Image (spheres, rainbow, N blue to C red):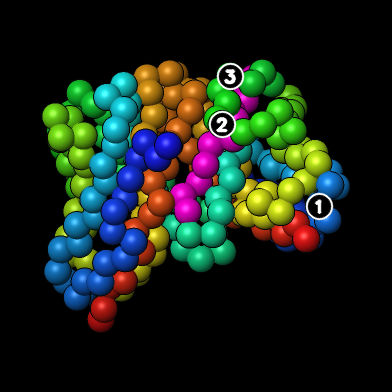
Amino acid sequence: DQQVKQNSPSLSVQEGRISILNCDYTNSMFDYFLWYKKYPAEGPTFLISISSIKDKNEDGRFTVFLNKSAKHLSLHIVPSQPGDSAVYFCAASGRTGNQFYFGTGTSLTVIP
Amino acid sequence: ETGVTQSPTHLIKTRGQQVTLRCSSQSGHNTVSWYQQALGQGPQFIFQYYREEENGRGNFPPRFSGLQFPNYSSELNVNALELDDSALYLCASRPNPTVSYEQYFGPGTRLTVT
């Protein structure tokens, strides 16, 4: 039972434009959401997170938006750079943080 | 400060055998989680250890077991290997779980079961 879903397996964006990666979840008890970036042959790297008490969190070029009523979050990357090309995973956890659920990932390609 | 390391990098085992994968967490991180990532899938949570006690478990059978040691290292043991156990196994550590949800991942161990 996939509780966190990323319905777009891949995304291509021109350098300098905005990249929008989407993630949906089914469990209303999720309290914390995270985005990770993964390069080949490396483990995922933490990118940005958001608590359920917020609807937006920004860190440099990266912004995460949370829509609790729609059970949807998105990651915006502006401007996109070729070095952003990687697989992006969203993840969710309940308040205890004792278990994390990951989506299947979206492969982002930023075209120079 | 060193990152999370895992050993071995690659491993080939035969169905029915047992395997032990190792992880060294970042210094000061008392929480470690293990994940299984099949090809084309996201990481699937196996279990989490906090201060050497298991405090969270995903939907994996008992033949998946673990240990966490006081020196921030941990092990994932899988008994009676099956072909479907072929995957990338990731460990992730983090500091006090009541403070931070951010996990730091190792590069993974690629297990192939033939």
Of discs 2 and 3, which sits in the foreground?
A: 2
- Kindly identify which residue carries mark 3: B55
Is residue A21 something that shows in the picture? Answer: yes
Whether residue B78 sits left or right of residue B56 in the image: it is right
Of discs 3 and 1, which sits in the foreground?
A: 1
Q: Which quarter of the figure has residue A71?
A: top left
| Residue A57 vertical placement versus A60 (above, below) | above
- Tag on residue B15? 1
- Kindly identify which residue carries mark 2: B59
Badge 2 and badge 3 both on one subunit: yes
User: What amino acid type should be assigned to the residue bearing mark 2?
Assistant: Asn
Disc 2 and disc 3 in contact, CB within 8 angstroms: no
Q: Which residues are magenta?
A: B41-51
Whole-percent x, y for residue A3 in the image: 37, 36
User: What amino acid type should be assigned to the residue bearing mark 3?
Assistant: Asn
Task: Identify the chain of the residue marked 3, using the numbered disc in the image.
Answer: B
Determine the CA span between mark 2 and mark 1. 21 Å
